[in-house]
Every structure is written in structure tokens, then in C-alpha cells.
Image: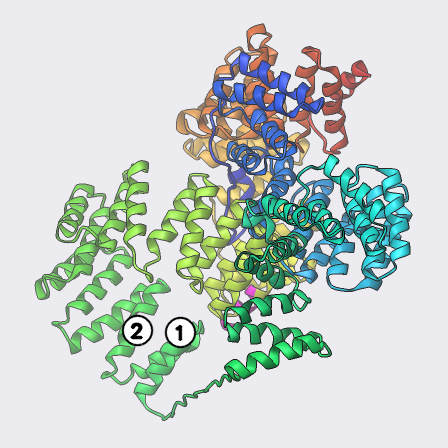
Amino acid sequence: MKLFPLSRHAAHVGRVGLLALACATSLASHAVTDSKAARYYEDALGRYERHDMPGAIIQLKNALQIDKNMLPVQVLLGKALLANGEAATAEVALLEALRLGVNRAEVVVPLAQAFIGQGKHKLVLEQAQFNPAGLPPAVQVQLLLLRASASADLGDVRGALKMIEEARVIDGRSPDVWLAEVPVRIRARQFAEAKTAVERAVSLAPSSAEVQYQKGSLLHVQGDIRGALAAYDAALQLDAKHIEARVARAGIAIDLAKYADAAKDVAEVQRLSPREPRAAYLKALLAERDGNAAATRTALAEVTGFLDPVPVGFIQYRPQLLMLNGLAHLGLNEREKAKPYLESFQRVQGNSPVSKLLAQIFLSEENFGRAIEVLEEYIKAQPGDGQAMTLLAGAHMAQGRNAKATALMQQALALKEAPEFRATLGMSLVGGGQIGEGVAQLEAAFKDPNQIQAGAALAGLYLRDRQSAKAIAVVNKLLKLQPANAGFNNLLGMAQAQSGNLAAAKTAFERALQIDASLLQAKLNLARVDMASKNYDAAAARLAEVLKADDKNVDATYEMANLADRRGQAAETLRWLEKANDISGPRELRPGISLVELHLRNRAPTLALDAAKRLYAKAPDNLPALLMYGRAQLANGDVEGAKSTFSGATRFADFNAPQQTEIAALQMAANNVAGAAYSLEKALSSRPEFLPALALMTDVELRQGTPAKAEQRARQILALAPKRAIGYSLLGDVAQARGQTAAAIDAYRKAHQAEPSSETLLRLFRALSSQDGGKPALQLGEQWMKSRPQDLLVRRALADGYARNGNYAAARVNYESLVQALPDDAEVLNNLANVLLRLKDPSAVAMAERALAKDPSNANAIDTLGWALFRGGQAEQADRALQLLRDARLREPANPSIRYHLAAVLAQSGRKTEARDEVEAALKIGRPFESSAAAETLLKTLR
């Protein structure tokens, strides 16, 4: 339960340029939990712990028939299905758990195993849900090793080793982080490095069968058959059921002509794993040695019977099985069936002798070009292979040599000193992001009044930079030259609208339509003026007229979405935006951008990411599309992906100061301080006195631990804008960073005096909260509210402050006032429910129900309701309280309050072992929480 933090609005006010990026999960209802379903779950949990997977799966499915949204059921079902070898259905259950809001750390490892079990290796490396960042250390290690295995299967040895090294940084004492390196090094034929890894694993776990097996596999591939055999023997002594060691030992026995020993091992493998294709292939080799053709074909048919039905996605990353099935089909004289397996094997492990087999198949098909390609590549790696050279010679005689030639062309631009050139130069500079230099060139060009194109471009740039007065002056010059130009009249209307003169804007748009009644932009701009004037019916009528003539007009459809949004019609806004996005062309990005923003605003990060991916695919080189994609990645917790996206955006923004400042703010949100500094340096190189960039750079320097630089920059800002609050506020931030509370309070007070606002007051409020138990802050807030009772930001800060100070009666009054103004704010509702709990008011349950209804996936709200039900003491609510708290714990396993609450309920229900595990985990988290003393007491009773 998250108790009374400074509100998320108050806590972030004042960081210039920083964006508030909320992360939420998809919604799921937790209002009702059936007690029968809960009993099914508890029974399934017991079966799972006894390794009765089929029984557990049945009981979990019974629970889901009653309530398909039970989060603990979906999590356990996914794990049980995976343990039962049902990777695809396990994936479905685990993804459903994520949709319902489970904390990623609880399911990411089994989900990755389910993906790899289906051959979805690329997805494990690409999808944000498999990013190790933010996970607990032990989970990170497991996930990194799984990703390393997937990366190695895909042929990215460097990437695999990098992930293994990252796992070692977290836990270098685990033998697994060393064993994982061995097959990767063997595949890359880096035997010395593989040996080092094996030796380290042996030193850490000499009695591990897997360690001995990996030791043997390295010796085997190096040709040390005796050493390999000894290692395999040791592995099997430690674990007689180790399939890999037994298969390898059987192969060595065949090579050493110890056929009886090989037959025993093959028989044992088939007993342990009746559908093991390698055992069937070894059985075929033994039968062939005995001259039993029928038994050989039967065994080879077993191999293909086992492997042919396996999905390609699963087998494509297992080269041994690819080769095995290819060889089996060749042995059965089924060349066409053998070819795709051998081709896939060659893609994974190129330049092996399999290349020669594959080339023979191509030659038999008279596909000489493909045969030449395969053989030439193979001979580069194996230049002394006479058989391969013979095959290649035959292919060349049949087909001849293919040569590829590439022609390069160059374009040169002849430059001359002329106004038209300067106009072109200016527009090219603007296109490259050097706005300042581009505008200067356009201004120079427009000194020649005949440079109409330069003037129009200049007016557009002024509008983009919100310099409406300059834009109006330029357009008026253009209209003197071409008064009957409908486009220029429309441009004048846009400039007037931006300046706030809606009447003049309307006149200009109407004049444009008098000149050209078909000018669509003027019609749309008139609708926008109507919207700005809150004349919504008139705007709707104008847009409907446009859509009547063209129901696929993107601009009118998009404005319909804006109109619906202004009217507060959420469903209509989404409908119109989706329609606009569907009908938009490849260069029309506004609907897609707005759709992502809408989903982010509605706290639907998964939908936002889907929309952002579509937008990014449409325009991968577009800066706004890149920024929206990065924001969606952040909202979904993919911090590393967002950093990469924003770094790419920095290159596209060049030296555009506003754009680079926006990117820097996003980099700060992604905790990429160095990236933010780089963007701001580019911004300030083109506009050294750009206040937003200077202000954000001050924050960056504080984050970098250089308060002296930050102070110098803050004083520069104060000199540039002495009547603004920002300079004083930043000086206050510097003082706070230095621990100089009195100086910080003085600076924040000056900022508030310079520009009295909610923002400046809340900075001062936070600084005063540490003084005299927070009384000065509360007095300041109360004084402000007397003259501004509708200021909800300050009201929220006051309510939180009273709650932290234990004045629950005053907190209740302020929260109730907030609830009246913000009836849909889940955080306010949840905090009020907590206050009511402290006051032992029975209405706490109803308020907690309201909070959860507004944000069904919020772990704090789920926890509050579960705890309120438990504290209510009603026996009939015990099952629901337990399920709610289980749900909350799965969503936020690092929240000690939630784990303590779950432990308390488990203890009362008699599940003392599980209760002890939870309360111990709560105390080990190491984060202070309100109920820590109660948790210690509970733990003593459970020992």
C-alpha cells in the first residue's frame, strides 16, 4: 500500500521541459472473486508443489471457468503447462497474466522458456517484455542466460557472450553463468575460452552432472575422446538420467567400435525418452553396421517421424536436429525432403561438410548457381578440401562464372551567388535541422521581393516558432504583391489565429474562400476557429460538409476527433482517430501521433506501443514518430529501447534547439543523463540563450554531480530573465542538492514572489515540508487555498501533507474536497480510503472499491481493498481479501507493505509457511515501510 506520497503532479512540477510519462497495464476487473474459484486455486497450488501437473492444470482451468480474470490462476497455469511440456499454451496463459497486470518479474523467465520452446528466439531478444532492466538480480541472471542461448542459436556469438558477461556481473558465483559460455565458445571454435569457462564451473560445482557433461562436450569436440568419455561417465554417475551425456557416450562407443556398450546406452535413452530422435539415429547406425537394411530404414523413418511434425520455428535453431533429419531423409533417398533441413543447418552453422551434401542435391536438381554459391563459400573456409573443389569444377563447367558489376553515379551542384540560390540554401538548411542559419538565409533572400517562395517558407517557419507578429508582417508583404492569392489569405488567417485574434483570422479565411471556394484548408481552418471559440455545433457542421463531399478526407476526420475530444466524448475521439489513422497516407502522421498520445493519456501503454509501432513502421526517419515510439517504449518499461530511440532522434533533430530540448527531457525521463546533455549541447550551440535548454541543462548538471556548473548556469538564466521565476527556482534546486535548506527556501520564496503560481508554491511547499514537522508548509498551503480554493494541485499537496503528519481528520476534509472535483482520480480515491482506514471508518471498503473500479490494474488500489476487507473482519470476505492481496503481490513483488498484508492474511487463514515466506521477503526488501514493526512481530509468531 503506497501511503500518502507527494502527489505525482506536485512531485514533478518545476522540472523545466520534463514530461510526465505514466506507465500502466491493461485493465482487468477485480471487483469480485468467487470463493469456489479460490478453493480450486489453492488445491491446484498443492498439486503443483507435488509435481502433479495434469491435476493442477485441471483445477486451474476449473477456476478460470468461474473467473477468467484471476491473476494468480493464470500465472500458475502458465508455469504448470510449461512444466508439462505445453509451451504454446503456457505462452497464452502467461501473456494473459501479463495483460491482467502481473509483475513482469514473476513470469518473464517461464515466458521466455515458452517462447524458446516454440522457436521464437528473435522475439525473446526483440520484445520489450524480455528486457532484463528493472528485474530482480536473480531473475535478471536467468533471463540473460536464456537470451544468451537464443542469441547464440541465431548466430550472434558476440551478443550471447555480452549477455553472459552481464549475468556474471550480477552473480559470478553461479556455475550456470560459466556453463552457458561453453556451447557458445564451442560453436565459435574458441576452445581455449571454453576451457576457461569449464574450469571455472568445475571449481564452483564439481559435483554437478551438467558441469561434467559440458567438460566432456569440450573435450569431445577437441578430439580428446578418452577425456570426453571419462567426463561423460562422471556425469552419469552423478545423474544416471542425464540424456545428453548418455547420447554423447553412445556416439563415442560407436566411433570406438564398442557396439554392445553403444546399444546399451541407446536402449537406456529410449527408455528414458522414447521420442528422442538422436537415439533412433544411433540405432540406425548400429543396424547399418549389422547389415540390417530393413532395421536401418525403420530407425531412419523413426527419426523423420519424430522430427518432421515438429514446427519449423522450433527446430530451426537446433542445428544438431536439422542435420539429423536431413541425413535421415538422405539415407531414405528423400533428397527433396532433406534439402530444407540441410539448408537451414548451413545457415546456422555454415562452412561445414554438410555444404558438400547440399551442393550435391543442388547439382542433381541442375541448380548450378546455388551449388556454386554454397561451394565457393565453403572452400573459402576449407581451401584444401579436394572433394569440394571437384564438385565446384563440375558446377562451373555446367554453368560458367557469374560476375556482378556495380555502377556508381555522382551528382554535382553548381553554386552561384543569387537570391534564388540563397532561398534554396535556406530551405536545405532548414531541412537539415539548422533552423537559425536557414531562417537567416531566407530573410536575406526575401529582401528581393520577387522571392515569393522564400517569403512563404519564412512565414511558415515563423508560425512554427510561434512568432506570429513576424509571420503576419511577412504575409502582408506577400499579399501586397498578390492580393488575390487565396493561399496567402489562408496563411494570414493562420498567423492571426495564432496571435489570438480569432475575428481577424475568421475574416482572412472567409476572404480566401471568396477567392477560391474549393480551398479545403480554409474550410478546415474556419472549423478550427469555431472550435477555439467553443462554437462546437458550427464546427461540426463545417466538418460534416467536408466529409459529405469526401468521406475519406483525413484532415476533416482528424478534426472530428479533435472536436470530440474538446467535447469530452472519449469513445468518439478514439473512433475518429482510428478512422483517420486507417485512411491516412504514408506521409500523414498526425492521426497516428495523436492516437499514441491518447492511449498514453488513458494509461493504456500496450495499445500505445502497438499504435507507435505502426507509426514508426510508417515513418522510421520522422522525428515526431521516433519520439512517440520512444515515449511508448518508456510507458511499457522498455527503458533501454527508449534510450536507443531517443539517441536516434537526436541525430534527426540536428541543431534544432526546441526539438533537442524536447529530446533531452525525454532522455532524462529514461535516466539517460549523458544523452540529455549531448542533446542540450547541440541545442545551445545553435541558440546559446534558449531558456528551456539552459534550464534543463542546469538540471542535468545537478544530476551529473556538478553543482558549481549548475549554479553558474542558473545565474546566467537569472541575468537573462531577472523578472522570471525560473532562475530563482533553479538556484533553489542547486541549494537543495548541496543540502543548504535555508538557502533553498530563500530562493524558492523569491521565485514565488517573482511569479506566484501553483508551480512556484509547490517548490516552496516541498522545501518547507522538512521544517518543524511540515507545519510551515501546511500553513503556506492553507493561506494559498483561502484565495484560490479551486487550486487542485495545492489541495492535493495539502491532503498528502496532513496524512503524512498523522492529521487524518484534516487529510480527510481535503481528500473529500478533491474527490468532489476529481471523482475519477484513482489515486485520490485510494488515499482517501487509506485515511478512512486509519480513522476506522467502515466506509473505507466502499471508497477502496471506487478506487479499484477507476484503476483495476493498480497494485496499490488492489492492496488497499484487500487490506480493508481483511480489517473489516467479515469472514465471508476472507477469500476475496486473500485473492486480492495475492494479485497485488504479483503485480508489485518489491512492495514490502503489500507482502506484509498478504502475510497477515495468510497467517490468519492457517497458511503459516507461506505467510512466513512473505513476511521475511517484506523485511528483506530493505525499504522502510509503515508496518515494519508489525511485520517483525508477525514473523516472531510464525517461527
Name the kind of residue labelled 2 in the image: Ala
Q: Position of residue 217 (x, y in %)?
A: 81, 53
* Farthest residue, direction top: 875
Q: Nearer the viewer, residue 756 or 59?
A: 59
Q: Nearer the viewer, residue 938 or 719?
A: 938
Q: Is residue 916 above or below residue 740?
A: above
Residue beneath label 1, please? 430
* Residue 13 relative to residue 262: left or right: left
Q: Quadrant of residue 440?
A: bottom left
The quadrant the N terminus occupies is top right
Q: Earlier in the sequence, mark 2 or mark 1?
A: 1
Q: Is residue 652 above or below residue 878?
A: below
The answer to whether the residue labelled 2 contacts the one labelled 1, judged by CB atoms less than 8 Å apart, is: yes
* Residue 478 relative to residue 64: left or right: left
Separation of marks 2 and 1 at Cα, in angstroms? 10 Å
Q: SS of the residue at dot 1?
A: helix
Report if residue 680 lies within the magenta region. yes
Q: How is the image coloured?
A: rainbow
Q: Position of residue 432 (x, y in %)?
A: 44, 74
Q: Magenta stretch?
A: 679-686
Q: SS of the residue at dot 2?
A: helix
Q: Quadrant of residue 817?
A: top left
The quadrant the C terminus occupies is top right
| Residue at 58 percent of width and 19 percent of height | 59
Residue beneath label 2, please? 457
Q: Nearer the viewer, residue 915 or 494?
A: 915
Q: Is residue 95 above or below residue 834?
A: below
Q: Position of residue 658 (x, y in %)?
A: 46, 63
Q: Position of residue 79 (x, y in %)?
A: 63, 31
* Residue 925 relative to residue 471: left or right: right
- Magenta-highlighted stretch: main secondary structure? helix
Report if residue 839 lies within the magenta region. no
